[in-house]
Amino acid sequence: MVKLREGRLRKPPAEKFLKYSIKPLLEMERNQFYYYLWCDMAHTVMLAERGIISENDAAKILVCLREIEEKGPDGFHLDPKFGTFLMHVERYMAEKVGEDVGGKMHTGRSRNDQSACVQRMQAREVILNVIDALIELQRTILKLAEKYMDAIMPGYTHFQHAQPTTFGYYMLSWFYKFERDFQRLKDSYKRTNLNPLGAAALVGTSWSLDRNRTAELLGFEGLVVHATDAVCFSPEYPLEIVAALSILMSNLGRLCADLYSWSTYEFNLIELPDEYCGTSSIMPQKKNPISLETIIGMVG
């Protein structure tokens, strides 16, 4: 099988190039293993439906992709000298069904739009996982607010007694803060969950691809319409996600800082469950709020 670099480059990759460039990239792609294969599967199905490749060739390609999927990221050997994950997949298919068949999977596609698609698939899963956890946090806050709606406590400003309130009323304030975090993540999901596949390397392709079909197969809600915009190397959607997560972590840190202070002997307003606390190796009388300290430390 002719390696990709042999089309233009005459020398093999340097060891340092493999070590510091290709190997780290492969490790990142190993974490995106299934997203790459699902992207390949969707593209292959679309090519067959459009008549760009035969159904027989598509079936052979899909069988190979399923075989790789079953091996899993730990069972599919990756060697930096063979290049990126794409090249490993095509190499596997060339050995199984021949280069003439295996190479057809990449018709009308570049590593650029493939990688952009994978990154968006991974990012949207991160968002959904955080949203799930955030909803569970909000449910817990509502339960606490209801349980302690009559538990009178001082309300603080500048760490001074300000007005009387209840612990339930205090907790309810955090429900609304986290609801705004939920809305920010939900909005960022809309702009993340768009299909860049079919944009090729920069300005699209002359192949008659059906981008809406791959969007449907991969669960995207729409398209990144402009090809150059779809494969640009500095998309803003990750920044939007990071901003939303940063605000969320800031809110978590503020909540934990309050609870941390109130759990001390000086305040003695709340007590954390034993299973979320630690103690001292030399002062066993201490009950240290380690879980709160961990979250506060993560905020930075």
Image (cartoon, rainbow, N blue to C red):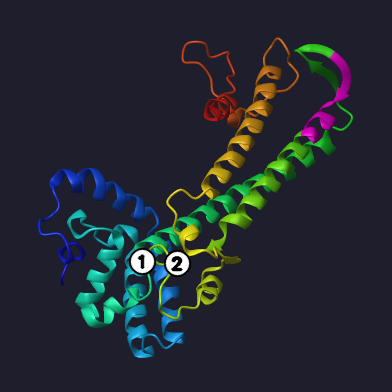
Q: Which residue is mark 2?
A: 199
Q: Is residue 134 left or right of residue 75?
A: right
Q: Report if residue 164 lies within the magenta region.
A: yes
Q: Residue at x 55, y 49 (%)?
A: 237
Of residues 54 and 133, the one nearer the viewer is: 54
* Residue 186 position within the rendered picture, expressed as x and y whole percent measured from the top left: 66, 52
SS state under label 1: loop
Q: Is residue 244 above or below residue 169?
A: below
Q: Is residue 20 above or below residue 211?
A: above
* Mark 1 / mark 2, whichever is N-terminal: 1
Q: Quadrant of residue 180?
A: top right
Q: Report if residue 197 lies within the magenta region.
A: no
Q: Amino acid at mark 2?
A: Ala
Q: Tell me the crowding category of disc 1: few under 14, some 14 to 19, or many 20 or more residues within 10 angstroms, Cα based.
A: many
Image: magenta residue range: 162-173
- The answer to whether mark 1 and mark 2 are in CB contact below 8 A is yes
* Residue 146 position within the rendered picture, expressed as x and y whole percent measured from the top left: 84, 38
* Residue 201 position within the rendered picture, expressed as x and y whole percent measured from the top left: 38, 63
As drawn, the residue found furthest toward the left would be 11
Q: In which quadrant is the N terminus drawn?
A: bottom left
Of residues 196 and 184, the one nearer the viewer is: 196
Q: CA distance from mark 1 to mark 2?
A: 8 Å
Of residues 158 and 74, the one nearer the viewer is: 158
Q: Residue at x 15, y 52 (%)?
A: 13
Q: Is residue 80 above or below residue 276?
A: below
Q: Quadrant of residue 109?
A: bottom left
Q: Amino acid at mark 1?
A: Ser
Q: Which residue is mark 1?
A: 110
* Residue 288 position within the rendered picture, expressed as x and y whole percent measured from the top left: 57, 19
